[in-house]
Image: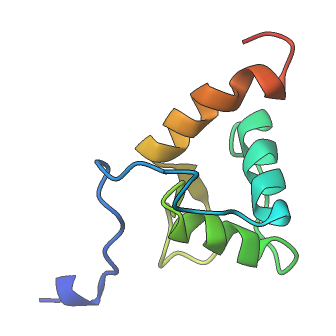
Amino acid sequence: MFLSLIPLHRSASNRYDPAMNTLSQPALALFRLHVERMGKIDVDDCNREAFRELERAGLVMNSRPFAGRSLYSLTKAGFDLKRSIAPSLSGSA
């Protein structure tokens, strides 16, 4: 029925490969902030494009694509990257 209108996201088996995907500095900074704040970041015009870049890279996905406010969650690839950079994000890993 309407399923054809729902955008398909990358498969959870796709992993983020830093050699294949180069993130801009704003997107990388936003990813780190997203991890530090456990996803509690308001999406607005200032960071929307960086979130979209992270989504294209397969690190986050829009959890509410049709419900007003955007809410981005880490994908499997995002969690994998989070684990690999977590020591640089805080003193306790």
49 above or below 41?
below
In this image, 79 relative to 93: left or right?
left
Residue 85, by quadrant, is top right
Q: Residue at x 88, y 76 (%)?
A: 46
In the rendered image, the quadrant that contains the C terminus is top right
30 above or below 53?
above
Q: Residue at x 76, y 54 (%)?
A: 28
In this image, 81 relative to 27: left or right?
left
Q: Foreground: 45 or 67?
A: 45
58 above or below 74?
below
Q: Residue at x 54, y 44 (%)?
A: 78
| Total number of numbered discs in the rendering | 0
Q: State how the image is colored.
A: rainbow
Q: Residue at x 35, y 64 (%)?
A: 10
Specify whether residue 71 is in view: yes
Specify whether residue 70 is in view: no
Residue 38 image offset from top left, x and y in percent: 70, 37
Residue 19, by quadrant, is bottom right
Residue 27, by quadrant, is bottom right
Residue 6 image offset from top left, x and y in percent: 30, 81
Residue 25 image offset from top left, x and y in percent: 84, 61
